[in-house]
Image (cartoon, grey):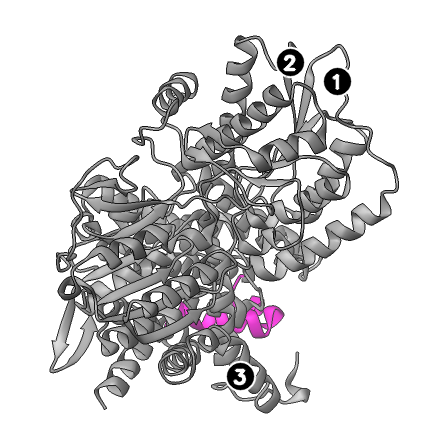
Amino acid sequence: MTELAQTLIFGVLIGSVYALMATGLTLTFGVMKIVNMAQGAFLVLSAYLCYGLWSRFGIDPLLGGFIVTVPMAILGVALYRLVIERVQRIDPGLTIVATFALALVVEACITLIWGPDPTASTPAYFNQAFRLGSVVVPRAQFYACLLAVGVTVALQAIVRRSWLGHAITAASENPEGARLVGVQPARVGAWIFAIATASSAFGGAALSFLYQFTPDSQDVWIGLTLSVVILGGLGSIPGAFAAGLLLGVAEAVTSTYISVRWSAAVPTLLILVVLLIRPQGLFTRAARPDAAT
Amino acid sequence: MSERRRHPRSIRYLAAASITALAATACSSTASTAGKVSSGPITIGMSLPMTGPVADVSKSGLQGYQLWSSQLNAAGGLLGHQLKLNVLDDGFDPNQTATDYTRLISQDKVNLLLGTFSSLLNAPASAIAARQGMLYVEPSGGAATLFTRGFTNLFFAQPGTTTSEPDRFVAWIASLPAGQRPATAAYVTQDDPSASPAVAVFKTRLQALGIKTVYDQTYDPSTTNFDAIASSVAHARPQLIIQGAVADDGAAFVRSLEKLNFSPRMLFQTNAPTDSAYPGAIGRANAEGVFTAEAWSPQATYPGNAAFVAAYTKKFGSPPTEDAANSYTAGQVLAAAVRAVGRIDQKALAAWLHTHTVSTIVGPLKWNSAGDPEGSLLLAQWQSGKLQIVAPKSAATTSHIVTVKPAWAS
């Protein structure tokens, strides 16, 4: 029983980290239908920035995540203005290629600045744990989980309750109609990218103290975050959170009770099953065909 | 760039690359005329991953080759000829490696070959060299599968392959009084052509000593989260843990054990603890007592090693890596054979190496008929912030061995 409880706790904690990593991608994919392939690189860049703040100035990565949102938001706006907006005018499908290329550039820049060796932040809590009887709750994962909940709630509030959120929804669903009521889709697009890229700062902060990372770690994270977004349903922020939890728990249970080797196949298997049974994702409703704009 | 640096999905690529290489060489019907020395320099061909995912770390491997050739040239060269390195870039692509070695032999007509890095790349390269009848001394590529193909021209320039990693550790365990030996062991390994066979040998030999296996799992190379694995290991409560770690999976697993506050009496990990980033990643105090094996140590007292470290540091401004030492060693092996034979005759060179021992900076090297070195890797242990060589005695940098690993420091 203890082993099962421990496994579920590990699953929930790591699942929330997956959800945290996927928030930016959920936003750009869901609202603007843009697959930002540079999201993994932004996560790793944020991790390096948080690491830099920790190693040079002693700033805890959790606090560093908040600081790093500022440069990441600026990077997001620059990405939208200089790349996405221009490429979309040629062919919206090219945004995947453009952001993939950007990911390679970011990776190369990280390598030039920090080198290729593995890096990790080790604040005091990185290897400590709370104990609930015989069950262990790692402090680092717990803090990352709190961060994930906070970011999810904040993003959901922005999208659902703020004027900006309504403008985002309007611009993505009916750009012409949005223009008529004074919403400028280009400006809204820049805001979305600013928020999405800034949110990767928190994922990067968690990455910096949970794992060792290298400039090419983005390969791992872009795959996992895409899995979360597809499972949760495109654009559903709560859906992405729930999908992250599902993924984490499924991995942990598979690793403990079936085979360690099979746990790596869990994301792919889950996606296959979901695409067969519920192609719109687990937590979104299918759109009516006649509702397409 | 040791094995851990290479992308661990090697097993699939290794097979694909070998097939591709064999196909490429089969298409090449031109008999090699390489190997004959004209009046010019002796050209030595190699293809290295100078770009791509391991570009930064393979640089030191090239520098090892460069130092070896420059030292030899300064001393008059080989057989009265200066040496000239012909270096191609394969971008860490096995197919490009096959193309490059074919070009070096058939088009560039180099006199001699030296190997590249990783089992992934050396598999196709050595197959082409075998097909063309060229001697192939490789600085890296210790996967056991490379030495089961019947090649007689392949020589691995390290003291042992990955399957020899357990030798000294198991011998040390066997030398302990019965009361100090671990009673139980857990085996965790990445699915990797180097790590998995080594861990399998560990298990067989430790079981033969009466050490009971309480956990044995292989994880996928893409595994990043080790909490559930560590939890299962902790649940089994082994006194000894053997991990076939390839890269940062070594530190990641230890970090998970630390969170669970489960500290085994003994911990042996392949590859990972030799990485300079390892102690920092797990907390410097927590590296104390961790065992690993390595092919070379800058502190080892083998002839020429100290001079190599000093010359490399002077020439390139930083201390040599294991990859630099391994490529330098491959050069030493090649030069020893050429000097002894007195001419560049690929068959005669291979025959000489099969019957002689070569003194190198990683110790004396001697090979079996498959080119598999008949030695063992060095047994190393982290002690007081330094990776010390604890066996064999001839290379040991300390006589002290931490028998029981201290508990994790928070």
| Chain at tag 1 | B
Q: Quadrant of residue B394?
A: top left
Dominant SS of magenta comes to helix
> Badge 1 local density, few (<14 within 10 Å), some, or many (20+)?
some
Q: Nearer the viewer, residue A11 or B335?
A: B335
Q: Is residue A70 above or below residue A19?
A: above
Kindly identify the amino acid type of the residue bearing the numbered disc 2: Leu
Report which residue position mark 3 lands on: A281
Residue visible at 72% across and 37% down in the picture: B100
Where B295 sits versus A62, above or below? above
Residue B61, position in %: x, y?
50, 33
Q: Tell me the amino acid under the disc marked 3.
A: Gly
Pointers 2 and 1 in contact (C-beta within 8 Å): yes
Q: Nearer the viewer, mark 2 or mark 3?
A: 2
Task: Tell me the subunit letter for badge 3.
Answer: A
Q: Is residue A224 magenta?
A: no
Q: Which type of secondary structure does the marked residue at label 1 adopt? A: loop
